[in-house]
Image (spheres, rainbow, N blue to C red):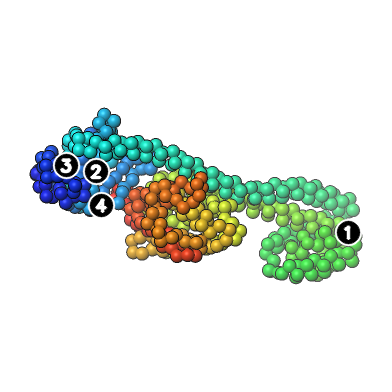
């Protein structure tokens, strides 16, 4: 592979070396060489011996990391002369990594200045001794701080989600327990009432007619025309009077269950004719209890279906048992995240979804995108407090999916708009935020998916816009 010398005037134009003297530039130029790389050719490869510090002179490069927990992480492409990679920590000497910690790939025909790692380490140590110690301290201290805060961020997010999910699960679980408890007493009373009918000598054919009436009533549960509370109350009063006329005790307790199943005073006369005058009171008691049993069973079914739905949402949110990279409907991810937050949404906050259902499946790391939606929705809810409107909408523009999350909070001041994606920058009170939520979201959207995240805000209206490519990123391919 052909290598050429570099002119000191070309090095002087780079922001890395603009303050160096001619003597230093000459020393630098004679220590390294320029090499040309074709498109998609690796300049340095992760895991190989860290032998060179690489600086872009002309072209375009991309840094790619292969990680154990997050898979392939591709940073945005860079074409600014002077961007660098390779053995960037060589100045640490014996404590420097022995292999490259990333892959640096030419994404267009490029010219790269390659400086041997030992030469790079010597130059930094000799020319910038104070800077070397500062960099050493910042690197080790920053890494430790980031690890500690990352763990705290994950635990805080886990606690928030767990609390919300527990609250949401508690309501249907409590409803199911209550319904089952009432079912025990209702079934016991129904058995006693049925035994009483048998002792009173009700003929088998009339008992069959009564059971058929019970089946008809229970099938009507939930299928009645919509009625106002006043209309329901009037119907219960009318049926209660009719029940008392035929000698039914506790008529006012039976009327609500019977009305809910569509039972009317006219149908009461049909029952009297079918089961006989002497069996009508006991038959109506049994019929009302059978309807209540069906209502309780419906409540148990609804409660358990709600629990199943919440567990399904939690599974969708966490992406359990799924490959990390997949083609997925982003609306499923958004819905599961909103479902997880239901317990944290204040009663005065309304949630509006405006989905473009023509949006195709997107290639993504679904579990990581859920972390993005979690951070953005959590920030929106915090901004609004006890009342407002959370809006989640989707669209697509040519080869990009667009996901927007908006709130009606006070907005982001212009003075800090450019800083909100910086690590550790937060507007929350001490102890309430780590300042990493939006930084993590940016790294997931831009670094992992080759997308874009930005904010636009005025008082009373803030939108976070996420754009994701509808094609697989280069790193994934």
> Disc 4 designates what residue?
78
User: Which numbered dot is residue 114?
Assistant: 3
Nearest the camera: 247 or 2? 2
- Say what secondary structure mark 3 lies in: strand
Depth check, mark 2 against mark 1: the one in front is 2
Depth check, mark 1 against mark 3: the one in front is 3
Going from N to C along the chain, the mark reached first, 2 or 3, is 2
Q: Is residue 337 left or right of residue 109?
A: right
Nearest the camera: 261 or 91? 91
> Disc 2 designates what residue?
85
Going from N to C along the chain, the mark reached first, 2 or 1, is 2
Mark 2, residues whose alpha carbon is within 10 Å: few (<14), some, or many (≥20)?
Answer: many
Mark 4–mark 3 Cα distance, whole angstroms, equals 17 Å
Going from N to C along the chain, the mark reached first, 4 or 3, is 4
- Say what secondary structure mark 2 lies in: strand
Q: Is residue 294 left or right of residue 367?
A: right
Going from N to C along the chain, the mark reached first, 4 or 2, is 4
Q: Which picture quadrant has residue 241? A: bottom right
Q: Which picture quadrant has residue 45? A: top left
Give me the residue at 72% from left, 53% from top: 296
> Disc 1 designates what residue?
249
């Amino acid at each position: 592979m052909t290598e050429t010398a570099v002119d000191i005037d070309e090095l002087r134009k780079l922001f890395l070396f603009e303050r160096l003297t001619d003597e230093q530039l000459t020393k630098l130029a004679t220590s390294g060489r320029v090499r040309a790389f074709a498109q998609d050719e690796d300049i340095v490869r992760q895991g190989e011996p860290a032998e060179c510090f690489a600086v872009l002179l002309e072209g375009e490069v991309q840094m790619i990391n292969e990680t154990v927990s997050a898979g392939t992480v591709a940073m945005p492409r860079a074409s600014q002369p002077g961007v660098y990679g390779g053995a960037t920590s060589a100045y640490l000497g014996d404590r420097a990594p022995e292999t490259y910690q990333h892959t640096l790939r030419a994404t267009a025909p490029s010219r790269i200045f390659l400086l041997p790692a030992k030469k790079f380490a010597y130059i930094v140590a000799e020319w910038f001794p104070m800077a070397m110690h500062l960099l050493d301290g910042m690197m080790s201290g920053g890494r430790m701080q980031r690890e500690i805060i990352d763990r705290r961020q994950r635990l805080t997010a886990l606690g928030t989600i767990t609390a919300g999910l527990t609250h949401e699960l508690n309501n249907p679980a409590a409803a199911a327990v209550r319904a089952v408890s009432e079912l025990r007493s209702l079934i016991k009373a129904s058995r006693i009432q049925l035994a009483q009918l048998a002792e009173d000598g009700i003929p088998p054919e009339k008992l069959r007619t009564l059971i058929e009436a019970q089946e008809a009533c229970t099938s009507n549960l939930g299928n009645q025309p919509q009625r106002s509370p006043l209309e329901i109350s009037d119907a219960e009063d009318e049926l209660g009077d009719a029940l008392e006329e035929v000698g039914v005790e506790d008529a006012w307790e039976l009327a609500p269950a019977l009305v809910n199943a569509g039972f009317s005073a006219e149908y009461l006369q049909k029952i009297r004719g079918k089961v006989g005058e002497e069996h009508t009171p006991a038959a109506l008691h049994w019929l009302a209890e059978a309807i209540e049993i069906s209502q309780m069973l419906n409540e148990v079914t609804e409660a358990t279906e709600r629990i199943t739905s919440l567990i399904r949402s939690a599974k969708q949110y966490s992406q359990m048992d799924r490959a990390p990279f997949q083609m997925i409907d982003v609306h499923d991810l958004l819905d599961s995240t909103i479902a997880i937050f239901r317990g944290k949404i204040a009663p005065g906050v309304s949630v509006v979804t405006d989905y473009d259902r023509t949006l195709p499946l997107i290639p993504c790391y679904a579990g990581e995108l859920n972390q993005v939606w979690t951070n953005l929705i959590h920030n929106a809810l915090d901004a609004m407090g006890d009342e407002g409107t959370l809006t989640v909408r989707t669209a697509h523009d040519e080869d990009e999916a667009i996901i927007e999350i908006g709130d009606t909070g006070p907005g982001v001041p212009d003075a800090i708009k450019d800083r909100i994606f910086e690590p550790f920058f937060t507007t929350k009170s001490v102890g309430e935020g780590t300042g990493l939520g939006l930084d993590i979201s940016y790294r997931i959207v831009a670094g992992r998916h080759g997308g874009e995240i930005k904010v636009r805000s005025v008082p009373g209206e803030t939108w976070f816009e996420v754009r994701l490519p509808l094609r697989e990123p280069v790193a994934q391919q």
